[in-house]
Image: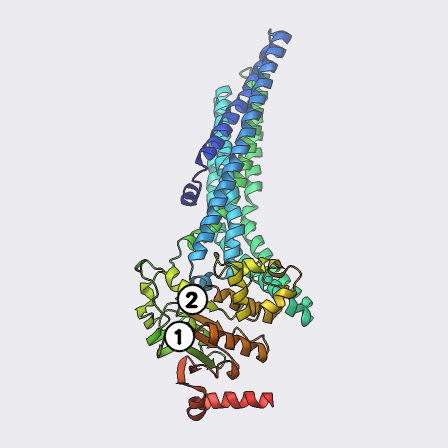
């Protein structure tokens, strides 16, 4: 936690130091007030000082209180500024780290967990950072200073605190050891609950279409109950901290009153000394209460810090550290040489096995296969969204690992199975393909993707605002916008992963015809469920159970591949 605080407080360390310094000054002036009060009572009220001394000492107490208040206000400002700056730096570091994650890294943590770590966990650390710069300085300093001042008034009476405070420290340490793993499990339950919320919101239309609101509510209620139960279990030990602190300190007050009372009766202590001593007891009590709160926050934040450190220290699965930054992709040729792949990275349960194929630059390749045949995994190896377990994938005659991630991915344009659009205008979404593209290029790409027609029907045209995820366009429209965005990259290779499944066959044919006319020289890979979408390809790959079952043209496969013939026959029956 201390490493996190130091590393990501850069730019705000001066404010953090000032927060600590001003809170220390607040304590100094606040601790002096009861000491002055002692003289007011002893000398002004019961002594010979009279009203003049009461006024003088009273004005001094007011001045001390005002200075203490000013220092407290400044400390609050510096503390808030430093803690929010720290949280900003930490969130930026987390987001930057996530942007470098490969698909495998993201699979390991899950989206919901990444969101929780970026929000709830960072907020916990932000609160602890602010407490660390202010209350973690104020409370122990107040405790020590008040104890010292109390000792100057009555040394033997203050010995009570020397006995009771170590007992409390040992108790707090034992509680921390026991509660940390419980809070860690609680945050895991938070991840699960957030994943549930995320799924329900993303699929809200499906939920409503199937009238499953009650079912989703029950699922969420179950997850929320899990979080509550985990929280209660974690807090069970912590709630003992307050009563224990009260028991020890109120016991100390009773003991103090007994001892001090005997001193007053014996004439060894004045009434003003007793009043001042009780004021210091109140300060000590308040300090211990605040230390208890800080202690609870630190225990919770320790779990949050561990989760954030796990994320920040995660080894990036795919890097380009050994790549040549000057190496550019010369053409769209692709070669798979004895390629095998496993999501588990240990060679067990291979998703792809012994893939061998050479694709010429400019060739159009169709890929057909049943669900689970690893078609998507096959194409994701080309731009290094995943790395091979065994074998080599070459693009432009070179191992893809020799290129930087930017250079290889700039050369490969991919329309994923799940079409994603972002909040903003249609044009802003399309410019993801090329930020420098002019309007004519954007229109041309949309015409090729058969998207210009429906865009022109919107009142604002290309300036139409899209909701989050493109909720205000249909599935087919979303697919065509994603294809247009991919075309704007002017890639060496374009991959369409079942990206025309939501458009009608006539529109699908127009898109394929446009590709033939305008993408000559660009290697095109089309994954499809409909054979009509790939039957005009130069070659078609038939995949089955993670292996290449057959390769050939439509006519060749109709003669040699039983799987292809069966799929074609079933689809023709569907048409009939």
Q: Residue at x 42, y 53 (%)?
A: 312
Q: Provide the residue designation for mark 1.
A: 362
Q: Residue 377 location, x and y as percent?
A: 43, 73
Q: Residue 429 location, x and y as percent?
A: 54, 60
| Circles 2 and 1: CB atoms closer than 8 Å | no
Q: Residue 218 location, x and y as percent?
A: 65, 65
User: Relative to residue 286, is residue 563 depicted above or below?
Assistant: below
Q: Left or right: where does residue 51 sit relative to residue 157?
A: right
Q: Provide the residue designation for mark 2.
A: 491
Q: Residue at x 57, y 53 (%)?
A: 231
What quarter of the picture does the N terminus occupy?
Answer: top left
Name of the residue lying farthest toward the top: 48
Q: Residue at x 51, y 88 (%)?
A: 568
User: Relative to residue 201, is residue 560 depicted above or below?
Assistant: below
CA gap between label 2 and label 1 equals 11 Å
Label 1: few (<14), some (14–19) or many (≥20) C-alpha neighbours in 10 Å = some
Label 2: few (<14), some (14–19) or many (≥20) C-alpha neighbours in 10 Å = many
Precedes in sequence: disc 2 or disc 1: 1
User: Where, by quadrant of the figure, is residue 47 drawn?
Assistant: top right
User: Where, by quadrant of the figure, is residue 63 drawn?
Assistant: top right
Q: How is the image coloured?
A: rainbow
Disc 2 secondary structure class: loop
Name of the residue lying farthest toward the front: 440
Q: Nearer the viewer, residue 180 or 202?
A: 202
> Would residue 175 be visible to someone looking at this image?
no
> Would residue 7 be visible to someone looking at this image?
yes
Q: Nearer the viewer, residue 160 or 185?
A: 185
Q: Residue 509 location, x and y as percent?
A: 54, 79
Q: Nearer the viewer, residue 57 or 463?
A: 463
Q: Left or right: where does residue 408 sit relative to residue 431?
A: left
User: Relative to residue 520, is residue 73 depicted above or below?
Assistant: above
């Amino acid at each position: 936690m201390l490493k996190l605080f130091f590393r990501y407080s850069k730019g705000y360390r001066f404010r953090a130091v000032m927060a600590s310094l001003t809170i220390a000054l607040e304590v100094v002036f606040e601790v002096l007030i009861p000491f002055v009060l002692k003289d007011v009572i002893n000398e002004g009220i019961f002594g010979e000082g009279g009203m003049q001394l009461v006024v003088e000492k009273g004005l001094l107490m007011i001045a001390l209180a005002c200075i203490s208040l000013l220092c407290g206000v400044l400390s609050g400002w510096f503390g808030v500024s430093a803690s929010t700056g720290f949280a900003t730096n930490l969130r930026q570091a987390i987001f930057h780290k996530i942007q470098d994650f490969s698909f495998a890294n993201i699979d390991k943590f899950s989206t919901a967990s990444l969101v929780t770590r970026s929000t709830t966990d960072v907020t916990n650390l932000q609160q602890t950072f602010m407490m660390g710069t202010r209350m973690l300085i104020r409370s122990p300093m107040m405790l020590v200073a008040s104890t010292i001042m109390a000792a100057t008034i009555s040394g033997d009476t203050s010995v009570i605190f020397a006995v009771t405070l170590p007992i409390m420290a040992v108790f707090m340490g034992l509680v921390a050891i026991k509660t940390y793993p419980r809070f860690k499990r609680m945050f895991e339950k938070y991840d699960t609950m957030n994943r549930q919320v995320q799924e329900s919101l993303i699929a809200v239309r499906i939920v409503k279409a199937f009238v499953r609101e009650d079912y989703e509510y029950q699922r969420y209620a179950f997850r929320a109950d899990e979080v509550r139960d985990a929280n209660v279990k974690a807090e069970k030990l912590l709630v003992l901290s307050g009563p224990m602190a009260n028991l020890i300190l109120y016991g100390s007050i009773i003991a103090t009153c007994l001892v001090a009372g005997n001193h007053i009766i014996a004439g060894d202590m004045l009434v003003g000394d007793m009043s001042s001593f009780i004021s210091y007891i109140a300060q000590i009590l308040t300090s211990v209460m605040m230390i208890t709160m800080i202690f609870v926050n630190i225990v919770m934040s320790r779990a949050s810090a561990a989760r954030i450190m796990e994320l920040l220290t995660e080894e990036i699965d795919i890097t380009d550290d050994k790549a040549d930054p000057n190496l550019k992709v010369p053409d769209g040729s692709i070669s798979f040489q004895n390629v095998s792949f496993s999501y588990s990275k240990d060679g067990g349960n291979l998703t792809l096995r012994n893939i061998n194929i050479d694709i010429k630059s400019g060739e159009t390749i169709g890929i057909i296969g049943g669900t689970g045949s690893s078609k998507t995994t096959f194409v994701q190896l080309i731009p290094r969204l995943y790395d091979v377990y065994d074998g080599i994938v070459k693009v432009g005659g070179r191992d893809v690992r020799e290129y930087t991630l930017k250079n290889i991915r700039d050369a490969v344009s991919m329309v994923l199975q799940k079409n994603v659009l972002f909040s903003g205008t249609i044009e802003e979404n399309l410019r993801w393909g090329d930020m420098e593209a002019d309007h004519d290029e954007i229109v041309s790409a949309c015409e090729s993707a058969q998207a210009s027609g429906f865009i022109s029907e919107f009142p604002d045209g290309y300036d139409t605002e899209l909701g989050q995820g493109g909720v205000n366009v249909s599935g087919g429209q979303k697919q065509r916008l994603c294809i247009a965005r991919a075309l704007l990259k002017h890639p060496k290779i374009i991959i369409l992963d079942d990206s025309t499944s939501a458009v009608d066959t006539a529109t699908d044919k127009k898109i394929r015809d446009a590709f033939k006319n305008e993408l000559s020289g660009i290697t095109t890979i089309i994954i499809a469920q409909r054979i009509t979408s790939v039957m005009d390809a130069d070659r078609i790959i038939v995949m089955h159970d993670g292996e290449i079952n057959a390769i050939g043209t439509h006519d060749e496969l109709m003669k040699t591949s039983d799987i292809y013939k069966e799929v074609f026959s079933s689809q023709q029956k569907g048409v009939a």
